Image: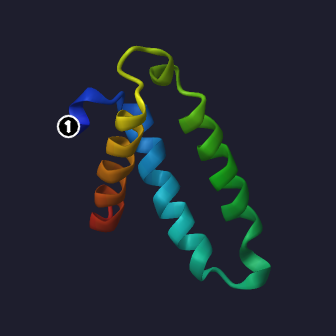
Amino acid sequence: MDRDRFPTDLLKDQTAWYLTYDELAVAPAGAQTAARRRLLELSRRVVGHPFWQTPAGTPAARVALKEIARTQAKAGS
């Protein structure tokens, strides 16, 4: 499944989720609250996206979305 099959906002949110998760992993103990809140908000948006209610929203699509988003996050987009 290529990235053009996913709604832009869904792919953007999943990519931001990975970037935020990586930030949280290196944040000092006292500076994690904002990143945790952002991660929770992004999780809510990704999981609750209407795309998952369509026939295209299969478990395989979830895996593909994560793979594409992780690649984009590693590339720094």
Q: Is residue 31 left or right of residue 16?
A: right
Residue matched to label 1: 2
* Residue 72 visible to an observer of this rendering: yes
Q: Residue furthest bottom?
A: 28
Colouring: rainbow
Q: Is residue 6 left or right of residue 14?
A: left
Residue 16 position in % (x across, y down): 47, 53
Q: Looking at the picture, does residue 43 appear above or below residue 24?
A: above
Question: Which image quarter is the N terminus in?
Answer: top left
Residue displayed at 50% across by 17% down:
53
* Residue 77 visible to an observer of this rendering: no
Secondary structure at badge 1 equals: loop
To which quarter of the image does residue 30 belong? bottom right
Question: Which image quarter is the C terminus in?
Answer: bottom left
Residue displayed at 69% across by 85% down:
28
- Near-viewer residue (62 or 34): 62
To which quarter of the image does residue 64 belong? top left
Q: Amino acid at mark 1?
A: Asp
Residue 20 position in % (x across, y down): 54, 62
Mark 1 Cα within 10 Å, few/some/many (few <14, many 20+)? few
Q: Looking at the picture, does residue 45 appear above or below residue 76?
A: above
Residue displayed at 71% across by 61% down:
36
Q: Residue furthest top?
A: 54
Residue displayed at 69% across by 49% down:
40
Residue 68 position in % (x across, y down): 29, 49
Q: How many marks?
A: 1
Q: Residue furthest front?
A: 59
To which quarter of the image does residue 63 belong? top left
